[in-house]
Structure formats: C-alpha cells, structure tokens
C-alpha cells in the first residue's frame, strides 16, 4: 500500500474549540500508483498536442489532490477519437467513512459510476426517440397517456413541460423515494397524480430533480408497453454495443460500481431544506441511498443511470454526430436539433436558485456562465449529483464525461472543478 498523506484545507483558523469538519479521503503521495489508463490516440491526429492532453490531466489530478473525490474517471473524445481515458483513485475502500481494514480497489476506465441526475439526458433521448417514431409527441399532454395525472389542474402539463422543468411539479413526496417502493408503479402513479402544482404549467423554471423522471418513465411504459429500461437497452444501447449504461445494474454487477462518499462540509439549513424538498429525502440520506442495492438495481429515470466515463462520452458522441455512430443510426438529425432547442434563457431556476439555460432535456452552455466552460454556447449536457458531468461541444468536435465518487455540496476546491472544465475548453479550441 503506497504511503498516504491526509490533506486538510481548513478555511478558518485551526482553534482548539473549532474541529475540522471537512470530510476528505486519503491522497497517496505517488499519484502514478493510483492512476490507470485506457486506449488513447495520438493527440496530433485530432489537432491537439501531448501538452494539451497532459494539461487537462493535471487539472484532474489537482482536483483529486483535494481529497474530495476518492475516484475520478475522465474520458474525452475529439473528432470521435479518444484522446484521454484515465481514472485516478480508488473505486472502493478509501473514503471518509471507509471501514477500518476495508480493501481498497483501484478505479480504472472500466469502472462504472452512478450518474444521478446526468441520467436525465439519457431518459430525455428515449422520449425523443418515441417522438421521432410518431409514438408520442412532445407537445402532447401527460394526461393523454396517464389520465389520473390530470387531477388538480395538471391537465395542461405537456411532455415538453416535463422535459424542460416547467411542469410545475418539481417535488416528490417522501414515499416516492422510499427504496422499497421503487418497483410499485401503481403507488408512484398515485403519488404523481396527487401532486400539487407549485406554478402554472409552462410558466416558471423549477428543476424537477426526481419527479420528471418518474412521469416520463410512466409515459414510455404506457406508450410502448415496455419499461423505459427495456426501451433504452433494446432500442439505443444494444445496437451500439454498450456494456454498462442503463438504469442501475444487475445484482451480479453490484460490486463493480464505484462506492460514493459524502465529502466536503456538512450540509446545513437553508441549503439542506432546499435539497430535501427537491430530492424527497434529507441530504445525509442521499449518499446512503445511492449506495443501496435497491437503488442500484432499480429504475429511477431521473437519477440512477450507471455508466463508465467512456460510455457516457460515447453517448454524447452519438448526439454530437447527429444520431449516427459507428455506422449505426439511432436518431434523425432533426431529433437531435429538437432535443437541444432552448426553452429557458438564463432564467432563475426556482429550485436551484441560479440562472439556467435548459432545452428539452439538456443543460445548455453559454458565452460566460457555463457548466461546460467559457465560450460554450453550442455545448449541451447534464450535471449529476454532485460533480458528474457529461456533455458534447459541437464547436470543438468534443464529447466528454467527468465522473466522480465524492458527493460534496460545499467545499473550498469547487473552483478546481470549474478550472478543469475551463482547461478543457482552452486546450481544445474550436474547429473551423
């Protein structure tokens, strides 16, 4: 076992009566001992230099040195070629709450992670595929497929409202997030149908952290007679040969998925109240739920996707290439265009409290304030709880994924993550 260094970055003076409450993992002195690589092409073949790639990787290692993320896996494609596919840290056994003597397992590019809200983009594309086939229309009312859902003034909610977080039902009752209830469709439909509007459908932007996924999943079930998990697998993933991506995993694969860890500062009110309202459970229970076999083998269309960084990057490469990848066409170009059509322009999100650009299923980039780095107006993708990002940037011929196992909300090095995205944008210039 390599020597380790426990890093601490207190933001207040270390006083006798002020404990260090910032939760971090142990960081090895020798980062090469916890770094693994996949197959990468010569960067020169896609207009980059080795220094460009290594500068990006240095940004990743800087993030890892913070101790906030026990494992980080990153995959970047440029013009369809993998220029970076690496992992650093441990997928199991090295976290703030790791059990004494627990075996540590290195993360590799083949390690799958739970995607949390980054799953929403995948779910959205299942719905867009059904629209492409004429099996539904984005403008249809949800109650046209789930009649009971129209109660309480919700009859005006369209599928498009749900995709764009404008349906007016951003929260879910705690019962919906009881892991014992995940397979109870009848109960979930009843809870959704009984939900009260918080605003007129279409009027306000309020991030639907969990509720929208359940609504869309039930619509897909009613339209096709198949679960959304089956439609995703048979109609999108299998034709492209994906190994991991999907909603959860089979019981036999549970031990392959990276363990998540609560890191950073403890979450206190009012942030904890806002997150509980959005997620349907207290924040300190979210990470426990994320590691629970019931969640990891269930179907939560807004939050329990599983994939490797390479696969998530490849999914976005499919979208960047207008729906065709490796000679297999899944989506028509017009379907991709529709899916990334802007619905909210830097409007204050009433759930997140931040200005956002949203399309019909994706978070969109912008010139200055962008999840995907500056000058990324054409970029689209999705964030996952809390530092997971999948995206495509057509202007840069780029598709990428950053997967992490630390789940902080507040921590001093959040700017290091933003710096990573900035470095990617700087080192991967726009193409003619």
Image: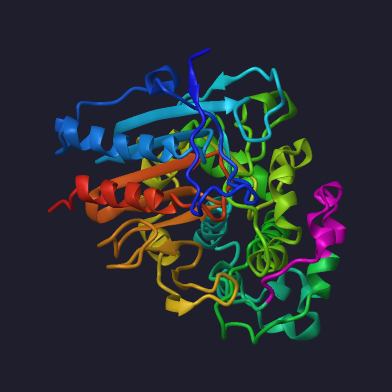
In this rendering, would 265 be left or right of 357?
Answer: right
Q: Nearer the viewer, residue 16 or 154?
A: 16
Q: Which residues lie in the magenta part?
A: 169-189
Residue 313: x and y in percent read 41, 41
The image shows residue 192, relative to residue 43, as above or below, that is below
Q: Quadrant of residue 50?
A: top left
Q: Nearer the viewer, residue 313 or 68?
A: 68
Residue beneath the point at 72% across and 55% down: 221
Residue 321 seen in the current view? no
Position in image of residue 164 (x %, y %): 53, 70
Residue 120, magenta (yes or no)? no
Q: Residue furthest top?
A: 1
Horizontal side, residue 81 vs residue 342: left or right: left
| Residue beneath the point at 45% across and 21% down | 34
Quadrant of res 219: bottom right
Against 380, is 350 above or below? below
- Whether residue 187 appears in this view of the structure is yes
Q: Quadrant of residue 32?
A: top left
Residue found 59% across the figure and 52% down from its top: 265
């Amino acid at each position: 076992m390599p020597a380790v260094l426990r890093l601490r970055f207190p933001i207040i003076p270390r006083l006798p009566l002020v404990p260090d409450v910032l939760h971090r993992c142990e960081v090895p002195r020798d980062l090469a001992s916890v770094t693994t690589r996949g197959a990468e092409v010569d960067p020169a073949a896609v207009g980059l230099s080795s220094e460009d790639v290594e500068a990006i990787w240095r940004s990743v290692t800087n993030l890892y040195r913070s101790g906030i993320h026990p494992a980080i896996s990153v995959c970047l494609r440029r013009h369809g070629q993998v220029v970076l596919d690496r992992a650093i840290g441990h997928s199991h056994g090295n976290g703030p709450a790791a059990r004494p003597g627990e075996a540590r397992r290195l993360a590799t590019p083949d390690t799958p992670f739970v995607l949390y809200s980054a799953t929403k983009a995948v779910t959205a594309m299942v719905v867009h595929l059904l629209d492409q086939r004429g099996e539904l229309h984005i403008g249809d009312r949800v109650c046209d497929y789930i009649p009971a859902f129209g109660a309480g003034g919700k009859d005006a909610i369209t599928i498009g409202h749900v995709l764009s977080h404008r349906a007016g039902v951003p929260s879910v009752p705690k019962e919906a997030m009881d892991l014992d209830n995940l397979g109870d469709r009848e109960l979930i439909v009843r809870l959704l149908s009984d939900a009260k509007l918080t605003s007129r459908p279409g009027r306000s932007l309020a991030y639907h952290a969990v509720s929208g996924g359940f609504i869309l999943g039930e619509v897909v079930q009613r339209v096709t007679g198949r679960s959304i998990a089956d439609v995703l697998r048979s109609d999108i993933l299998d034709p492209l040969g994906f190994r991991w991506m999907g909603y959860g995993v089979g019981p036999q694969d549970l031990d392959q998925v990276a363990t998540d860890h609560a890191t950073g500062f403890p979450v206190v009110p009012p942030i904890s109240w806002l997150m509980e309202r959005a997620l349907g459970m207290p924040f300190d229970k979210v990470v426990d739920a994320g590691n629970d076999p019931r969640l990891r083998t269930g179907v939560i269309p807004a939050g329990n996707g599983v994939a490797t960084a390479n696969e998530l990057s490849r999914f976005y490469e499919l979208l960047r290439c207008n729906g065709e990848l490796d000679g297999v066409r899944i989506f028509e170009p017009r379907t991709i265009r529709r899916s990334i059509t802007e619905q909210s322009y830097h409007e204050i999100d009433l759930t997140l409290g931040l200005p956002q650009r949203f399309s019909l299923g994706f978070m969109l980039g912008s010139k200055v304030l962008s999840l995907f780095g500056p000058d990324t107006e054409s970029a689209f993708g999705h964030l996952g709880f809390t530092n997971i990002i999948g995206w495509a940037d057509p202007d840069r011929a780029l598709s990428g994924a950053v997967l992490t196992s630390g789940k902080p909300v507040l921590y001093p090095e959040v700017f290091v993550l933003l710096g990573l995205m900035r470095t990617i944008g700087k080192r991967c210039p726009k193409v003619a």
